[in-house]
Amino acid sequence: MSMIPAELSKIFVRDAGKAVATLEEIYKRADSLNAEDLRSYTINIHAMKSALALIGENGLSQTAGRLEQIGRNRSIAEIASETPPFIASLHATIERLTPPTEGASDDVYEDMAFINEKLLVIANACVLYDKPEAKKALTKLRQIPLRRKTIDFLDTIAEYLLHSDFEEAADGVRKFLEASQIK
């Protein structure tokens, strides 16, 4: 399997984690699933089918395709028997793609003047729909020591930029800057 870009891995890990949590909750109620449970099951399995194909996990994506059809057919017995191994495989994939958190600590000194300066560049670039400029500032921020909370925030901004959701990115930066002024 080829190397998966770091940003794609992060997004997959986050989305797959949410899907797994939902699927586990639905599986716990497998003996009494209602129409909404079956709908949610099928939607989450479909999302994982697409995401797994995107990261090159074709075998697991095919399994998800089969489970999606089982969900559409409302085959509760098959959902109960086939979902646990799929969830286990998803957990293994998430674990394999989760990046190590070395260097991310809450006792890291953050250069808030530099961070705020680069965040303003990102916000202004977003107002102008200038994705390259915003990504350049984001890259510079990722090159300095940061706390886990800040890294998570930058991951969120990176995802907004990935999807060209400039208004959300700019709004997120504004809220972060306002919150950092309170401290």
Image: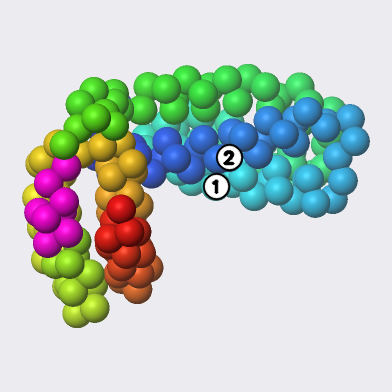
- Say which of 165 and 54 sits in front: 165
Q: Is residue 56 magenta?
A: no
Residue range highlighted in magenta: 110-117
Give SS at disc 1: helix
Mark 1 or mark 2, which is nearer to you?
A: 2
Residue shown at the point (72%, 34%) measured from the top left = 25
Say whether marks 1 and 2 touch (CB < 8 Å): yes
Determine crowd level at label 2: few under 14, some 14-19, many 20+ residues with C-alpha closer than 10 A.
many
x then y, percent, for residue 35: 84, 50
> To which residue does mark 1 refer?
47
Marks 1 and 2, how far apart in space?
8 Å
Residue shown at the point (12%, 62%) measured from the top left = 117
x then y, percent, for residue 26: 75, 36
- Say which of 174 and 179 sits in front: 179
> To which residue does mark 2 refer?
19
Q: Which of marks 1 and 2 is nearer the N terminus?
A: 2
